[in-house]
Image (cartoon, grey):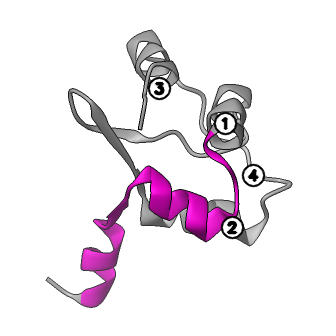
Amino acid sequence: MNGTARHALVILRRKQVEQETGLSRSTIYQRIREGTFPAPVRLGRHAVGWRVGDIERFLLEPSRYRAEPVTDRSSRREVRHEGG
């Protein structure tokens, strides 16, 4: 697997996302609900992570970032209940 493909598969956990973005946990989840921060991907029953590419796109222009609309209501519900 080349470096670009491997980079595309990297998942960051919440603490790493907080460090990379400088945002707090509550701000991250508030912005997810508002559609101004990338939604996490489900890694397991009680675990989520963020694709590094999604976070990099957010960091290019944080004030102008708009997430793709979430069509799966269960994903939205799971994000709200994530405890860390």
Q: Secondary structure at mark 2?
A: helix
Q: Say which residue appears at 79% left-offset and 65% top-offset.
A: 61
Give the magenta part as a residue range. 3-25
Q: Position of residue 44 (x, y in %)?
A: 20, 34
Tell me which amino acid carries mark 2: Leu
Query: If the image is split into quadrants, where does the C terminus sit?
Result: top left
- Residue lying at the far right of the rendered structure: 63
Whether 65 is drawn above or below 58: the answer is above
The nearer-to-camera label among 1 and 4 is 1
Q: Secondary structure at mark 3?
A: helix
Instruction: Give the mark count.
Output: 4
Tell me which amino acid carries mark 1: Ser
Q: Earlier in the sequence, mark 2 or mark 1?
A: 1
Q: Which mark is residue 79?
A: 3
Task: Name the quadrant containing residue 1.
Answer: bottom left
Q: Earlier in the sequence, mark 3 or mark 2?
A: 2
Q: Say which residue appears at 59% left-offset and 69% top-offset.
A: 20
Q: Say which residue appears at 66% left-offset and 64% top-offset.
A: 21
Q: Is residue 11 left or right of residue 36?
A: left
Q: Main secondary structure of the magenta part?
A: helix
Q: Earlier in the sequence, mark 2 or mark 4?
A: 2
- CA gap between label 1 and label 3 equals 12 Å
Q: Which residue is mark 4?
A: 65
Q: Residues within 10 Å of mark 4 (few under 14, many from 20)?
A: some
Residue situated in front as seen by the camera: 23 or 66: 23
Q: Which residue is mark 1?
A: 26
The nearer-to-camera label among 2 and 1 is 1
Q: Examine the structure image and report whether residue 24 is included in the region drawn in magenta.
A: yes
- CA gap between label 1 and label 4 equals 18 Å
- CA gap between label 2 and label 1 equals 18 Å
Res. 54 in view: no
Q: Which mark is residue 59?
A: 2
